[in-house]
Amino acid sequence: MPLIQVDMFEGRGPEIKREFVEAMTRETCRVLKCEPGAVQIILRDVKKSDWASSGVLWSEKK
Amino acid sequence: MPLIQVDMFEGRGPEIKREFVEAMTRETCRVLKCEPGAVQIILRDVKKSDWASSGVLWSEKK
Amino acid sequence: MPLIQVDMFEGRGPEIKREFVEAMTRETCRVLKCEPGAVQIILRDVKKSDWASSGVLWSEKK
Amino acid sequence: MPLIQVDMFEGRGPEIKREFVEAMTRETCRVLKCEPGAVQIILRDVKKSDWASSGVLWSEKK
Amino acid sequence: MPLIQVDMFEGRGPEIKREFVEAMTRETCRVLKCEPGAVQIILRDVKKSDWASSGVLWSEKK
Amino acid sequence: MPLIQVDMFEGRGPEIKREFVEAMTRETCRVLKCEPGAVQIILRDVKKSDWASSGVLWSEKK
């Protein structure tokens, strides 16, 4: 019953997301030996102004 | 100090959410033997276009 | 497709956990109008030495 | 590689968030002895109507 | 900067996990057009006695 | 009511964790203008064999 939660920068459209969940589910089933119906994926769009690395928000990186 | 994080499809109004957190808190306290003040609940609305099962986004299921 | 993730202090046995997920699922279905099969719950045991409130770990509260 | 995920009430502006991630990163590096480049922070704005304590949504507390 | 958090039943060994993070990272980079260095994955082993669906812990399903 | 969830490599002892939650709570209150009693922190120890970046588990990096 893998549960996959993905945070990514906002901005990806529905076609990219569709391809992404297809690929993630396919690879999960192949490697973990589970059924597609067991794989749940939740995508979370994150604004660049809500994500920091090295202490700097991505909205402010140059 | 139970912390309950709930992802659900977006679209529930404030009355449903009010009843939901009341019920979840009441049952948590009853079963886990804790005080209501110890129970934190965070609700996260998820778009059908951000949740997949079986490799298909719910926005695209027929 | 509600997904419920619960952090609680470690120490609850299997009977309490069984009763807890039964109650949470029942109330979720009743209030959110969904099928039991749609409800996923993940429980996470947290040590008192890994949970702080007011800046103090629960393992060190008196 | 600390990963810090923070839920807070919505409403903080970019200057507060900038100062917050700076301070959190600085203190994380100081105490955990790691490089700033290793610290990831994700901020999540939560509506008062999506956060409950004591069984009551914060949007309805008086 | 995708962050991928995966809950799965405990029991997978290091070789499966190695292959899993390789595949997930490769597909993420291919579909989302990002560098491997941007992809973080955290795996969480969950006991069957801590995961429920349909209101029943997986440790008690027959 | 900030909620702070921190994933870090396992291995930090109770003194480091105590200092860490003190510092995080103090800075959170200072910057976000909230009371210490409102700040919850959950620490999650992650094994190097459960955390990957660039597609490689940290347990296998050289």
Image: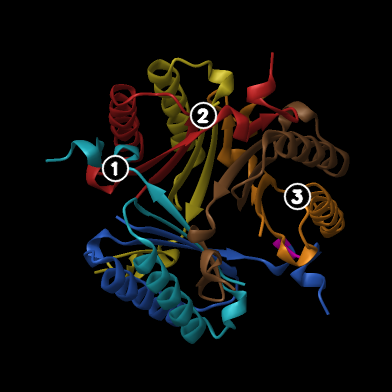
Chain colours: A brown, B red, C yellow, D cyan, E orange, F blue
- The picture places residue B31, in percent across and down from the top left corner, at 35, 34
**Mark 2 — on which chain does it sit?**
C
- The mark lying in front, picked from 3 and 2, is 3
Q: Residue at x 61, y 53 (%)?
A: A9
- The picture places residue D14, in percent across and down from the top left corner, at 39, 63
Q: Residue at x 29, y 24 (%)?
A: B19
Q: Main secondary structure of the magenta part?
A: strand
Q: Residue at x 61, y 30 (%)?
A: B49
Q: Secondary structure at mark 1?
A: helix
Among the 4 quarters of the image, the one containing residue C53: bottom left
Whether residue C18 is visible here, answered yes or no, is no
The residue where tag 2 is placed is C2
Left/right placement of residue B3 relative to residue F12 reads: left
Question: Which mark, by number, is residue E32?
Answer: 3
- The picture places residue C54, in percent across and down from the top left corner, at 27, 66
Judge the density around disc 1: few (<14), some (14-19), many (≥20) Cα neighbours within 10 Å.
some
Q: Nearer the viewer, residue B62 or C52?
A: B62
- CB under 8 Å between callouts 3 and 2? no
Separation of disc 2 and disc 1 at Cα?
20 Å
Which span of residues is magenta-colored?
F50-54
- CB under 8 Å between callouts 1 and 3? no
The residue where tag 1 is placed is D48
Picture layout, residue A6 above or below residue C34: below
Picture layout, residue D52 above or below residue F24: above
